[in-house]
Amino acid sequence: MSFLELDRVGKSFGPNTAVEEFSLTVTKGEFISFLGPSGCGKTTTLQMIAGFLDPSHGTIRLEGKDLVAVPPAKRGLGIVFQSYALFPHMTAAENVAFGLEMRNVARSEREERVRAALTLVGLAGYEDRHPRRMSGGQQQRVALARALVIRPSVLLLDEPLSNLDARLREDMQIELRQIQRNLGTTTILVTHDQIEAMSLSDRIVVMSKGRIEQIGTPQQVYEQPASAFVAQFLGKTNEFAAQVDRTAGQARLLAGSWSAPAPAGLSGPVTLSVRPERISFGDAGLAGRIASRIFQGNHWLFQCDTECGPAIVIRQNDGQPQPEQGAAVHLSWQASDMSLRAARAAA
Amino acid sequence: MSATADTSDARAGLSLALPALMLFIGVVVIPLAMTVMLSFHDWGQYKGIEPVFILKNWMEIVDDPYYLEMFWRTFRVALLATLITAVFGVPEAYILNRMQGPWKGLFLLVIIGPLLISVVARTLGWALLFGGNNGLANKLLMTSGLIDSPVRFMFTETGMIIALAHAMMPFMVLAVWTALQRLDPQVENAALSLGAGSLTVVRRIVLPQIMPGVLSGAIIVFSLSASAFATPAIIGGRRLKVAATLAYDEFLNTLNWPLGAAVAVLLLIALVLIVVGSNALIERRYQEMFR
Ligand SMILES: Nc1ncnc2c1ncn2[C@@H]1O[C@H](COP(=O)(O)OP(=O)(O)O)[C@@H](O)[C@H]1O
Ligand SMILES: [Mg+2]
């Protein structure tokens, strides 16, 4: 059942279009990420859901009711801002209590819920601290507690972890996911970090230049990218110019000296993309030479020059001998590990 | 190694600061010290200034209710003018900060523009509008039949307060506007999303955060108003004196320089105490929040 629904939502600032034709259906309890490079319209979309921006086109519905007509104060959504936007003149507890005060929750219940919320985010004992005297991670947790304590129908997070250092970010990712699972709050996370999006979300909305490129589970967008943009944005990928040859009795897909039976539907020049960790070295396949190799602890990273241009290959450090720099190699992969697109006519 | 570098650095710093230091000593410290000394000298109608050390002038100011009243008036007028600038200046700055594009620049100019005009000219404007029967505004109001007798403005404390508040308004607006610009606009959005109405946002979120700005604006306006000369001189004349006009009169009309010096020094001390004291209070109050 659709819980939150965006239907062909668009937003223009004067002559510039920030978001176009954004359609998405979110089910209750789902964790969705908006993933894309900076400036692709993620924040704008989130602010339209929050009500701080009015969409230029389209409708937004929550449980079937039109949300656009509702002022932000009445939407009942929990929002965590990139800058945290804590109230600097209030203590952590006062910050968290603010939303409950606005809802006229009785004092005793309010105190109980504030304590529970701060405990949930691991900040029990910090009630009387002012935000300026807390670390970035702690401020982040206060902001999360403040958004969750009002039991929002949807939790909106705008790059909440981008101001934290790498180690803390990983901890917070795990915690965020656990809290969200336990509470079952429908959540939308904005991020430009593909690892974060993949490790947290049920589904990812990949965006570029104000448009949706693909919506899918982390595995889907990683393994079956709908466009070159998605393939490249979600981790490293290799793209080879290939040919579907239907002249012989059986149609073949050819990339240099690598070949496989061609799938139905495509013919002529195609773009073949395959992730570096799915390529193995063998006796037959795409011929090339190791240009350089880098040891990265649990894996090796190889740069190869091949018949079809440069390629990268990642091999697990499983104790097997690996090819040396300058060695002649053949690259091969399973047909199920690659994805194919018709090459653009001009290219 | 580093110690020598430090000492030579310190010496270089000192020699660089020396010209400014000399200037400061020459034009601020020495005249001030001389004024303080002057306030302890004796004066008589026929003998003039006698360089002795007596407390006569100070006793006179403290004992004579005439002088005391003038000091009270000075601070009363300054305080009320400060309140008025705060009451009107804070919303003005808030609205200014909310404005977009060219309007913002235009209105900022309108607010700061008066600073480019002499305060004498601005105060004389009030005199032209409300100066007795011939004041423009008074004439208009009387011919239109709205009032029977002219609005009493000149030579009143009310007039002085209004004219001072008008002259000092830009300082308050600028101080508050600076504080507003430091606010994260998302903080207001955060309050909205938690269910606060726009009035609640202003009262509970915006005002407390800009309070240090309002208070520092108030300190500026208060000290400028309490030591103002031109506006009280034009509106109050010699009938309604404040400390600054009193000191002026003692120096230039009565020629009792020592008494004038005592008045000036007392005003200075009172102002310094008030400013330093309230500043310390503000800092202590907002220490938690803005560290
Ligand atoms: N208030 C605004 N006025 C004009 N342009 C804006 C405004 N807010 C965002 N934009 C533009 O809209 C585009 C999308 O911005 P944003 O949603 O903030 O991107 P993201 O959050 O994905 O980095 C950008 O090109 C940005 O310059
Ligand atoms: Mg953004």
Image (spheres, rainbow, N blue to C red):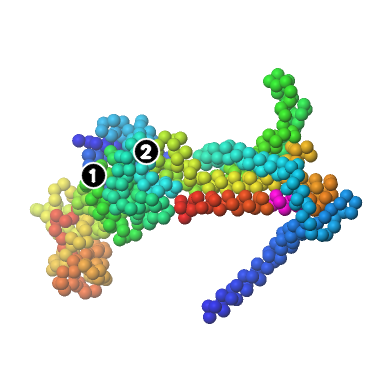
Residue corresponding to mark 2? A101
x and y percentages locating residue A243 in the rendered image: 19, 55
Q: Amino acid at mark 1?
A: Leu
Q: Which residue is mark 1?
A: A183
Residue B274: percent from left, percent from top? 62, 50
Mark 1 surroundings within 10 Å by alpha-carbon count, few (fewer than 14), some (14 through 19), many (20 or more): few
Instruction: Answer left or right for A122 relative to A91.
Output: left
> Residue at 60% of width from left, 39% of height from top?
B83
- Residue at 67 percent across and 37 percent down: it is B161
From this viewpoint, is residue A7 visible?
no
Amino acid type, label 2: Glu
Give how far across and how far down residue A14 sits, in percent. Answer: 44, 39
* Residue A34, numbered circle: none
Q: Is residue B260 magenta?
A: no
The chain under label 2 reads: A
Looking at marks 1 and 2 on the same chain, the residue that comes earlier in the sequence is marked by 2
